[in-house]
Amino acid sequence: MLVMVNRLLVEPFALPFMQRALIEVLLLGAMAGVVGVFVVLRRLAFLADALTHTVFPGVVIGYLLSGESGIVPGALAFALLSAVLFTVLAANRHVNQDAALAILLTSFFALGVVFVSRRRSYTADLTAFLFGRVLTVDSTQLTQTAVVAVGVSVVLLALRKELLLRAFDPLAARAMGYRVGLLDLILNLVIAIVVVAAVKAVGTILVIALLVVPAATARLLSDRLVVVSGIAITVGMSGGWLGLAASYEASINRGVRLASGATVVLALVMCYLFALGAGPLSRFARGRWTRGRRARGRLVDVQASGEWPDGPRTPTGLTAGTGM
Amino acid sequence: MELGAAGRGAAEADGDRPAAVVFARASIAYGRVPAVENVDGVVRAGRTVALIGPNGGGKSTLIKAMLGLVPVVDGSIQVLGRTPAGARRDVAYVPQADALDPEFPVSVNQVVLMGRYRTIGWVRRPGRADRQIATQALTAVGLAHRGADRFGTLSGGQRQRVLLARAIAQQPTLLLLDEPFNGVDTVSREALLRALGELREAGATVVVSTHDLSLAHLACDDVCLLNRHQFGFGPISATLTPDRLRAAYGGAALALAGDSVIVAHA
């Protein structure tokens, strides 16, 4: 058993290029897990998806202008531009946000396709941009990813109170004097930067899975924000590890070529499906526990006030215990 | 429930108290459509003022204008001697609890602690003093034993009490509540009234919107009668006259003995 685990999960990473790929997906998984929690809380999955598409022309233009080294600056420029555009659009009440996002997404993406179609190696290039090449990550890119991961974590850690309040109760945040538009811009920029950091490894399309799936998985398993963040990071990192190992095993030892980026995404989705199955179980256990606590809580209520507390009479009251 | 037992409506006219909010012929609009027009009056410090009027009459809008969240297009509103937006740090706002996502993974304690965020400032974490203030606020609304539970597992009325606790934790000079008694069960209603009573004793200035006249009698000193424009502003007994109520509610008001007035909603 141990030998099996060792052969499948550890041995592939003796090779230097596999080592670099592993470090890259671990960094990306952790970082995307943290940011993803806010993406899921704010229900920004569609915005993140739009960002992954609007970054695409930047990737292409950067590559056309100065090859491999132009990809990140190009992507960054377009990511920042679209993050600002999205924030401005969201702040405008007269614009239908979904439609505006969809228009930006498709027009930017089309722009990218137009540029890439001018090249002879059209299909191969397109595939690389869309799905990434994690196995060719070099140490410069690793450093870049590490710097971004640290930066993103510092920003989110520093602003987590305010981002939490803004996600939970934007009206109260504004009433307290917080500039909600500014907070939104910062979060959108952070998401954009994560997308750019992940472009090389998993491509513009698959980044969305890194951002959304670990956090959504964690959300199925816990109601406590600290726990949710912890699980999201763990799922993001282990999905990367498992995916890489699986694609190596299939490609090298079984002769079935599996694209590593896509396999990472499938590994993440597997985690999600497991959580989907485990969620009801853990909810059941937790429900029994909270019902007991609530019953005791009511007694305290009665003793304190001398009145009967409010039982689950209202529809909202009924959700206690069963609600997720 | 007993109505206005201590003759609250006859509270002495203490015009020499400083003004917490001054409305000077204020009109408020979303875009070009005026929502409330010509509000004129003064909320004195230490008083509890009810915004009374039918639904859609502009009560919530007026509260948002006091926070600087909707623009005053004509006249002016001064809050604590400043512009509404400039006074936000000393004003606490209690929104309607049912506007919040019950699935949001946040505990009751975390919600109450949010009232401390402005004081704590950026980057720093809540300290022991903040937690203590939050616990006291939660105790004041009678929910100290629910602190560890997820916000969404509480009943609607309990959530409303948690939001009041969050506002109390802000230690504001002025407290604004938007329809806090809407769809709230009896126990929570009593708890809210008790907490508001304590705030009143402690000298807080409170503005609370409600379409429930008996609550205004029970918990407030003054009243602003509102339906698109102002039908009266002043001490309850002098302001909530049958004539004015009929005018504001479009004839759907009935006057009974004494100052208890019942409004039949259409």
Image: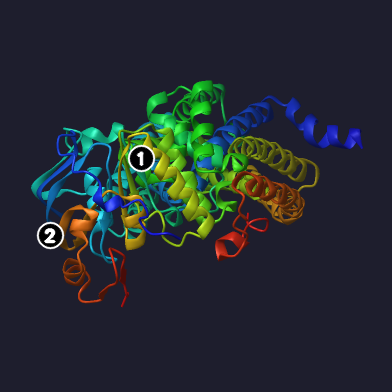
Residue B100 picture location, percent across and down = 45, 52
Residue A35 picture location, percent across and down = 51, 37
* Residue A94 visible: no
Return the chain for callout 1: B
> What number of labels is visible?
2
Bin the neighbour count of mark 2 within 10 Å (Cα to Cα): few under 14, some 14-19, many 20 and up. few
If you read the primary sequence from the N terminus, does the residue marked by circle 1 or circle 2 appear first?
Answer: 2
Q: Which residue is mark 1?
A: B200
Label ID, residue A216: none
* Residue B37 visible: yes
The quarter holding residue A65 reads: top left
Bin the neighbour count of mark 1 within 10 Å (Cα to Cα): few under 14, some 14-19, many 20 and up. some
Residue A129 picture location, percent across and down = 48, 44
| Residue appearing at x 24%, y 50% in the figure | B10
Depth check: A213 or A13 in front?
A213
- Identified by mark 1, the residue type is Arg
Depth check: B235 or A80 in front?
B235
Return the chain for callout 2: B
Camera-near label (1 vs 2) is: 1
| Residue appearing at x 45%, y 43% in the figure | B195
The secondary structure type at the circle numbered 1 is: helix
